[in-house]
Image (cartoon, grey):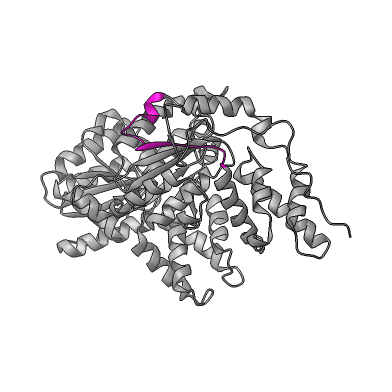
């Protein structure tokens, strides 16, 4: 409640008699006005709706007409708050517009008199736009969400224990929702049998069912940055800026990182880097799903996109992850015209966004991105992630063998590395998984020979998309910083046509 009360308090300091509050949380606004009225020593807030009229009971049914109710409030002009709930649909009526102007002139002469017009949509007509202060309702913070969660956990239908770490993760997952939406999501999640390890998945599933909330998804942070194989230049960049991504650095006037664009070959760990950045800086990660923004499920793309940007601002400090930004913002393909009008709004936001919102974007086809987006001042750095070299492939094999419960020391890593020139990280992961499944089928530990056998059937992306990868490297030659150290962008060879190079590593006869 603190942030909403502070927002209203700052607006009241300028003595605006008419406030237009963009939002739909009637109960939350009413509670905030009641708190402010108590602080100011004024009367309890009143309200008006088109079904009940003014709730003071003094004027009866005739106050249900909006023009009549506004005229009455102007005649009675006295200190206090009136929450006007249903005025937006009537703003096309000349009598209502005239009554609203009369109310402005009457109430501005009475200190402490305010009409708070609450509406989830619609726009103010030009006749009254200059007389009304418009405010966006801030999203609930951790204090409000925590209070709601504690209340529901104490309820008879959902009484249970929630570990502290899981509670914090749950509150992070709820960020971006208004209080009413969070209540419904929590009811859906807490109604499950127990609080299992897939709690966050349940929250995301429930969020996707709410209008206006499914496109901004909380993503649990990935592993430590050290767990990412190779990419020494990118990791050093992140490590150097870790001490300055916090409120103390902002207050001290230090340069706070704004964002990075990670481009490169598909399957080489770009998304994993975005997750690792959030983990390194100990801030939540939120992924903006542009497909859902443009789907129309949550309203017009323009409104959904702007709501998403406002939401992430309220969640700071945070990392905003935009995957495949060249497709997400519609810069390429036959439908690019439908999204290009959002481009200038996104550029302006990137320039003016709060300092503790870090944008981590990935791209596969960087040539489709306009130069305005990738210039310095919006993204701090553009990194190019190439196919892993021999040393990085060795790290990847060791990492994925460990993930599959094997001892890397029991495998011929030198042969595996030599035979996978031009492979990306995703292909190495999948061939190790396939080898493990082969061993499980035959009820034995999997071996180097199993990896080799499965590798022979894989055609790496560097061969099927060699022309596209070459064009990507040509573009990145003098436009991007290699994410890996110790080599130039074009040092890597693409996979040749002969495929796996070590047929002598065969499976033992059974």
Question: x, y (%) of residue 243?
Answer: 30, 54
Instruction: Find out whether residue 372 is within the magenta segment.
Output: yes
Q: Which quarter of the image is occupied by the C terminus?
A: bottom right
| Number of marks in the rendered image | 0
Asked if 375 appears above or below 179 in the picture, the reply is above
Q: Residue at x 61, y 41 (%)?
A: 424
Whether residue 124 is in magenta: the answer is no
Image height of 140 relative to 341, above or below: below
Q: Residue 460 or 143: which is nearer the viewer?
A: 460
When asked about the image quadrant of residue 26, the answer is: bottom left
Specify whether residue 94 is in view.
yes
Question: What residue is rendered at 36% in x and 36% in y?
Answer: 379
Residue 173 at what x, y percent from top left? 47, 58
Front residue of 168 and 64:
168
Percent of width and height locating residue 435: 74, 54
Q: Nearer the viewer, residue 8 or 167?
A: 167
Left or right: where does residue 190 sit relative to residue 306? right
What range of the chain is rendered magenta? 371-389
In the figure, is residue 333 to the left or right of 414?
Answer: left
Q: Which quarter of the figure is the N terminus placed in?
A: bottom left
Can residue 58 be seen here? no
- The residue lying at 50 percent from left, 31 percent from top is 326
Quick one: 479 or 107, which is closer to the camera? Answer: 479
Q: Is residue 442 above or below residue 287?
A: below
- Pinpoint residue 474: horizontal percent, then vertical percent: 51, 24
Work out whether 107 lies above or below 459: below
Q: Is residue 486 left or right of residue 1?
A: right
């Amino acid at each position: 409640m603190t942030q909403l009360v502070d927002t209203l308090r700052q607006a009241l300091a300028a003595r605006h008699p008419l406030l237009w509050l963009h939002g739909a949380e009637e109960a939350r606004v009413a509670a905030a006005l009641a708190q402010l009225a108590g602080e100011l020593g004024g009367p309890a807030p009143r309200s008006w709706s088109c079904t009940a009229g003014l709730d003071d009971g003094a004027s009866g049914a005739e106050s249900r007409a909006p023009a009549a109710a506004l005229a009455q409030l102007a005649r009675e002009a006295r200190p206090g708050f009136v929450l006007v709930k249903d005025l937006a649909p009537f703003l096309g009526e000349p009598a209502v517009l005239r009554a609203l102007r009369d109310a402005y002139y009457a109430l501005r002469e009475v200190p402490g008199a305010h009409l708070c017009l609450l509406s989830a949509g619609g726009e103010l007509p030009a006749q009254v736009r200059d007389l009304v202060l418009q405010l966006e309702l801030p999203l609930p913070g951790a204090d409000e969400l925590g209070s709601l969660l504690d209340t529901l956990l104490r309820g008879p239908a959902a009484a249970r224990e929630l570990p502290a770490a899981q509670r914090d993760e749950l509150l992070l997952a709820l960020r971006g929702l208004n209080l009413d939406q969070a209540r419904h999501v929590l009811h859906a999640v807490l109604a499950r049998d127990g609080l299992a390890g897939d709690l966050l998945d349940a929250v995301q599933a429930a969020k996707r069912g709410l209008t206006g909330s499914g496109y901004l998804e909380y993503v649990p942070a990935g592993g430590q940055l050290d767990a990412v194989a190779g990419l020494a230049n990118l990791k050093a960049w992140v490590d150097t800026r870790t001490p300055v991504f916090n409120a103390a650095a902002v207050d001290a006037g230090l340069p706070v990182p704004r964002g990075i664009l990670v481009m490169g070959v598909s399957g080489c760990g770009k998304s994993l880097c975005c997750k690792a950045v959030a983990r390194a800086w100990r801030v939540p990660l939120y992924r903006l799903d542009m497909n859902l923004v443009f789907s129309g499920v949550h309203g017009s793309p323009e409104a959904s996109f702007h709501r998403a940007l406002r939401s992430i601002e309220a969640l700071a400090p945070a990392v905003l992850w935009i995957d495949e930004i060249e497709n997400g913002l519609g810069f390429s393909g036959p439908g690019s015209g439908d999204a290009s009008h959002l481009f200038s709004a996104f550029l302006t936001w990137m320039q003016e966004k709060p300092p503790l919102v870090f944008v981590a974007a990935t791209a596969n086809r960087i040539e489709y991105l306009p130069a305005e987006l990738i210039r310095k001042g919006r993204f701090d750095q553009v990194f190019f992630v190439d196919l892993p070299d021999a040393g990085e492939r060795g790290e990847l094999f060791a990492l994925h063998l460990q993930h599959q419960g094997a001892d890397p020391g029991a495998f011929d890593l030198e042969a595996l590395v030599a035979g996978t020139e031009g492979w990306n990280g995703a292909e190495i992961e999948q061939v190790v998984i396939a080898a493990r499944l082969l061993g499980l089928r035959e009820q034995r530990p999997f071996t180097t020979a199993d990896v080799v056998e499965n590798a022979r059937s894989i055609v790496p992306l560097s061969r099927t998309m060699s022309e596209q990868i070459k064009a990507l490297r040509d573009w990145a030659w003098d436009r991007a910083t290699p994410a890996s150290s110790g080599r130039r962008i074009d040092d890597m060879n693409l996979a040749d046509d002969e495929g796996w190079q070590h047929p002598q590593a065969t499976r033992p006869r059974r």
